[in-house]
Amino acid sequence: MPQLETITVVGVVVLAILVWLYFRQRSKDHVEEVLARHKGSARVCSRACLLEGMEQIPVALALTADAINYENRDLQASIDLSVIEEVEYDDETATGHTIAGKVLRLRAHNHVFEFTLDLPSAKEWEAALPARRVDRGVDRAKAV
């Protein structure tokens, strides 16, 4: 009987791993679907990770003429370019962690949004949305 219990436990663990891999792959597929949907209308769109504390949330990030959209299966949000006070590209997060690639940091209404990008995507984003600091709302971010 101990063999049957061992096989059952191993089977449950393997099943849990397969379910986790399936859902992880489906979330990547959904991000790809969102990127495909935005390709035609966006100036730049790429995969990114939204940083919320220590959590990295995979998202599709798209720059349109008037907003930056980020979404995945559980999240659909945007930031209007008119409210962005600062655009910054860095190799460290706001908490001081160094990453491979670049961090796109946006400041709007005293809130910081951070997205990690791979280097090729970061170059595209820097060309389309240059880094800038705005003093007291005189000027706002805009896509090039």
Image (cartoon, rainbow, N blue to C red):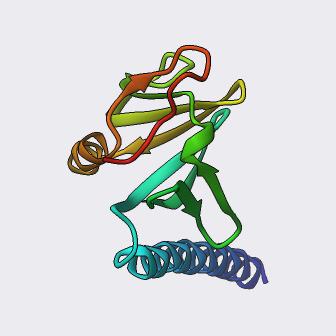
Q: Against 66, is 20 above or below?
A: below
Nearer to us in this view, 37 or 23: 37
Residue 43 at x, y = what percent?
A: 33, 62
Q: Residue at x 71, y 24 (%)?
A: 110
Q: Quadrant of the N terminus?
A: bottom right
Of 129 and 90, the residue lying toward us: 129
- Seen from the viewer's position, the closer of residues 31 and 137 is 137
Expressed as whole percent of the image width and height from the top left, the position of residue 70 reads 56, 59
Instruction: Depth check: give the residue in front, 122 or 128.
Output: 128
Q: Residue furthest front?
A: 138
What residue is at 62 percent from the left and 49 percent from the top? 79
The part of the image, by quadrant, that contains residue 102 is top left
Residue 9 against residue 76 in the figure, above or below: below
78 in relation to 105, above or below: below
Q: How many marks?
A: 0
For residue 126, above or below residue 24: above
Residue 33, percent from left and from top = 46, 82
In the image, what residue occupies the spot 28% across and 39% down?
126
Residue 57 in the image: x percent, y percent? 59, 52
The residue that appears at 24% across and 49% down in the rendered structure is 124
